Image: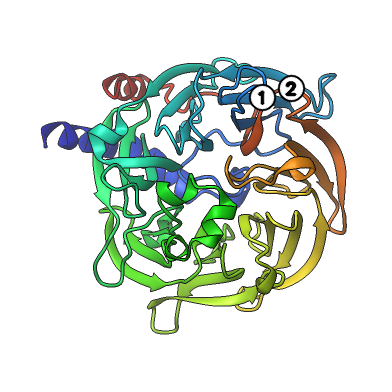
């Protein structure tokens, strides 16, 4: 317990004032809207680059997972072009990424090999470098499939999807220092209605609450999708809960029944709003989590995405900075939808466009004028043949129509399957520049 107590003292003395400043800053101080509220040095205007965590394909390029950097500034002569690639030398089902709170490091994980790669993006944002790979997590923690990387003050909270015992859906979270030293693990609840599953993380600092969602374990997400949907037993092994936690103590407070694998969680970023939305992959619903008149947190489905009978498979969502709109990507029909959230109790679809034969992640700039889309879901779930497009597409959004700005064909470029995106800027600086903060960063190494 001594190392943990020491890191807590350091966080309280040095990082807490900074964290509170981030948490209660005005909305205009953040960039892409699904980042942690504890992040600093955020992009307020035009992003310079887009980082793309990319799944390797055997026989395509070097066949390894890699971090791809695309120039995203229209003023640049390299706009819309790949300007850097960094292979990690292995193929482990590259999936999600997350910045540390100081935006110095970008963490990226593999759902199959359970490795975490830590990239330095501060020294040269246009050309990241790999500074550490953590490869012993299943043995050390019993957890498999690092999925969500969520910045805490001086820490990284990682949500896993599976476990090393039976590769099922019961899992947990792990807290690390920004440089990758393990601090603690936290089990997902399996009592009081909890199914033990995990997927995404979202924190509301003002209310001191954290929400987590649930997906499925390694046995399912590494299975061929066609085989999976024919396996009745496997189809029962998907998450059906969201959990409300005390954000400071990481203690579960309430379990919500949310059938159909609730995935991404997005809190409204508008001042005064204290509600979040999530979409369920298998039942095509938008769920709202908010307090009722008595102050009790409740969850309820408030809208339908497409035709659930056709299983459009909602995958990623991105909320607007003012909390009044939500982008939703549905994988099977390749459609990007926009929902009006002016009344979050009754979202209304106001726009839809087929943006690919298959689409997965959707990321928008803080000003809402640019929307980026990737194609890959999971290696064994992506479509086959001519429907297996692999791309990053950037669109301009004028409030009425998505207009294609540029496209990078990841198969033609011999890069692999484009999955998760994060924005970068040449102006990024480390948050820990004071002498005291440098001492904390050094202690965490």
Q: Which mark is residue 369?
A: none
Image height check: is 161 above or below 289? Answer: above
Q: Is residue 342 visible?
A: no
Relative to 255, residue 133 above or below:
above
SS category of the residue bearing label 1? strand
Quarter of image, res 195: bottom left
Q: Give the left or right position of residue 379, taking residue 231 as reference.
A: right
Q: Which residue occupies the foreground of this view, 439 or 309?
A: 309
Residue 75, by quadrant, is top right
Of mark 1 and mark 2, the one earlier in the sequence is: 1
Q: Which residue is mark 1?
A: 69
Residue at the image position 67 percent from the left and 73 percent from the top: 309
Position in image of residue 215 (x %, y %)? 46, 56
Q: Residues within 10 Å of mark 1 (few under 14, many from 20)?
A: many
Q: Residue at x 62, y 28 (%)?
A: 57
Residue 337 at least partly seen: yes
Taking depth in this image into account, of 207 and 70 the one nearest to the observer is 70
The N terminus lies in quadrant: top left
Which residue is located at x 81 percent, y 20 percent?
A: 78
Q: Give the image location of residue 279, x and y in percent.
A: 57, 64
Identify the residue under disc 2.
Answer: 82
- Residue drawn at (51%, 35%) of the image: 93
Left/right placement of residue 173 relative to residue 276 reads left
In this view of the protein, which residue sits in the foreground, 43 or 385?
385
- In three-dimensional space, the C-alpha distance between marks 1 and 2, rounded to whole angstroms, equals 6 Å
Task: Determine whether label 1 and label 2 are within 8 Å by CB.
Answer: yes
Residue 117 position, x and y percent, is 45, 26
Between 228 and 76, the residue placed more toward the observer is 228
């Amino acid at each position: 317990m001594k190392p943990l107590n020491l890191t807590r003292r350091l966080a309280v003395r040095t990082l807490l004032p900074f964290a509170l400043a981030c948490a209660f800053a005005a909305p205009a101080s953040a960039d892409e809207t699904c980042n942690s509220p504890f992040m600093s040095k955020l992009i307020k205007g035009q992003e310079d680059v887009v980082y793309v965590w990319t799944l390797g394909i055997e026989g395509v390029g070097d066949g390894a997972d890699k971090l791809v950097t695309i120039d995203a500034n229209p003023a640049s002569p390299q706009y819309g072009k790949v300007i850097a690639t960094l292979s990690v030398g292995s193929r482990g089902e590259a999936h999600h990424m997350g910045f540390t709170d100081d935006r110095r490091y970008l963490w990226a994980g593999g759902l199959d090999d359970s490795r975490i790669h830590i990239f330095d993006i501060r020294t040269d944002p246009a050309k990241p470098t790999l500074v550490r790979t953590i490869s012993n997590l299943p043995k050390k923690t019993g957890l498999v499939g690092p999925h969500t990387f969520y910045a805490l003050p001086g820490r990284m909270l990682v949500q896993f999807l599976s476990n090393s015992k039976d590769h099922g859906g019961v899992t947990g979270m792990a807290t690390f220092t920004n440089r990758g030293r393990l601090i603690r693990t936290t089990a997902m609840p399996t009592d009081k209605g909890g199914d033990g599953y995990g997927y995404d993380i979202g924190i509301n600092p003002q209310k001191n609450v954290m929400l987590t969602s649930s997906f499925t374990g390694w046995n399912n997400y590494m299975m061929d999708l066609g085989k999976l949907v024919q396996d009745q037993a496997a189809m029962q092994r998907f998450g059906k809960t969201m959990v409300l936690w005390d954000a400071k103590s990481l203690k579960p407070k309430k379990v919500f029944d949310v059938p159909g694998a609730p995935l991404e969680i997005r809190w409204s970023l508008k001042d005064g709003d204290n509600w979040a939305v999530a979409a369920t992959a298998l039942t095509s619903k938008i769920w709202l989590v908010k307090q009722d008149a008595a102050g009790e947190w409740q969850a309820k489905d408030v809208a339908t995405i497409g035709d659930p009978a056709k299983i459009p498979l909602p995958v990623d969502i991105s909320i607007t900075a003012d909390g009044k709109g939500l982008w939703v990507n549905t994988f099977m029909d390749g459609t990007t939808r926009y929902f009006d959230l002016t009344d979050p109790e009754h979202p209304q679809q106001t726009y839809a466009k087929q943006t690919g034969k298959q689409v997965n992640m959707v990321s928008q700039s803080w000003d809402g004028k640019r929307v980026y889309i990737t194609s890959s879901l999971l290696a064994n779930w992506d479509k086959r043949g001519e429907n297996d497009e692999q791309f990053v597409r950037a669109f301009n959004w004028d409030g009425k129509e998505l207009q294609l700005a540029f496209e990078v064909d990841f198969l033609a470029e011999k890069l692999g399957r484009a999955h998760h995106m994060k924005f970068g800027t040449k102006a990024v600086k480390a948050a820990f520049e004071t002498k005291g903060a440098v001492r904390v960063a050094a202690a965490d190494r």
